[in-house]
Amino acid sequence: MRAALQNVPIFAGLNDAALNLLWERATEIKVLAGNVVVREGETGNRLFIVGEGLVRVCKHLGQSDEIELAKLAPGNFFGEMCILETLPRSASVQAVTDATLYSLTSLAFYHLYEAMPAQHSILVLNIARDVSRRLRHLDEIFAARH
């Protein structure tokens, strides 16, 4: 359902044509509770949107020094850093409950850039704002602990 995109902050301000272009390239993925969606350190080129369920973002998943960074519910997303850069994944994501995710590859974003550069610019600006918001949140958590 295309509404999954409309309810995600990074897609705010995109017109119907841009949303349709992205939605046509989205893949639905069902993940069982406990399964790992992406692993820290692996390469990736997909952004994921949580359609249903709950996932958690962790550093050092399954290790004694595991740190949970966030829990993401419907309308949240992860993997945006792999769209912006080609570095390995910075964290692991594991399903807390059975979840339905929608994924978009970096190629989908490139198609948007080719077809509608102004819409692509809105999307990149929205991603930058969200990354900044998340970084501020982590800074606050870090400062409160030290």
Image (cartoon, rainbow, N blue to C red):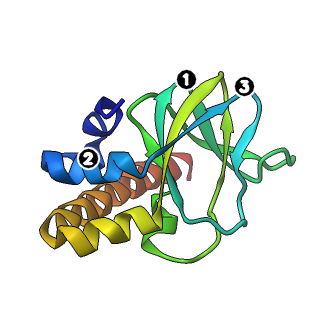
Give coordinates of residue 130: x percent, y percent. 32, 54
Disc 3 residue type? Answer: Ala
Residue depicted at x 53% and y 58% = 46
Residue with the mark numbered 3: 33
Q: Are marks 3 and 1 in contact (CB under 8 Å)?
A: yes
Q: Position of residue 120 (x, y in %)?
A: 23, 66
Residue 14 visible in the snapshot: no
Task: Report how far apart the C-alphas of labels 3 and 2 lie in the structure.
Answer: 30 Å
Q: Which residue is mark 2?
A: 20
Mark with earlier residue (3, 1)? 3
**Above or below: residue 54 compared with residue 27:** above
Tag 1: amino acid: Gly
Where residue 54 sits: x, y (%)? 56, 27
> On residue 53, which mark appears?
1
The image quarter containing residue 80 is: bottom left
Q: Earlier in the sequence, mark 2 or mark 1?
A: 2
Q: Judging from the image, what secondary structure is the residue with disc 3 in? A: loop
User: Distance of mark 2 from mark 1, alpha carbons?
Assistant: 24 Å
Indicate the position of residue 12 as horizontal and vertical percent values.
19, 46
Q: Quadrant of the N terminus?
A: top left
Q: Secondary structure at mark 2?
A: helix
**Closest to the observer, 70 or 13:** 13
> Which image quadrant for residue 99?
top right
Taking 26 as reference, is 122 left or right? left
Which numbered disc, 2 or 1, marks the residue closer to the eye? Answer: 2
Which mark is in front, 3 or 2?
2
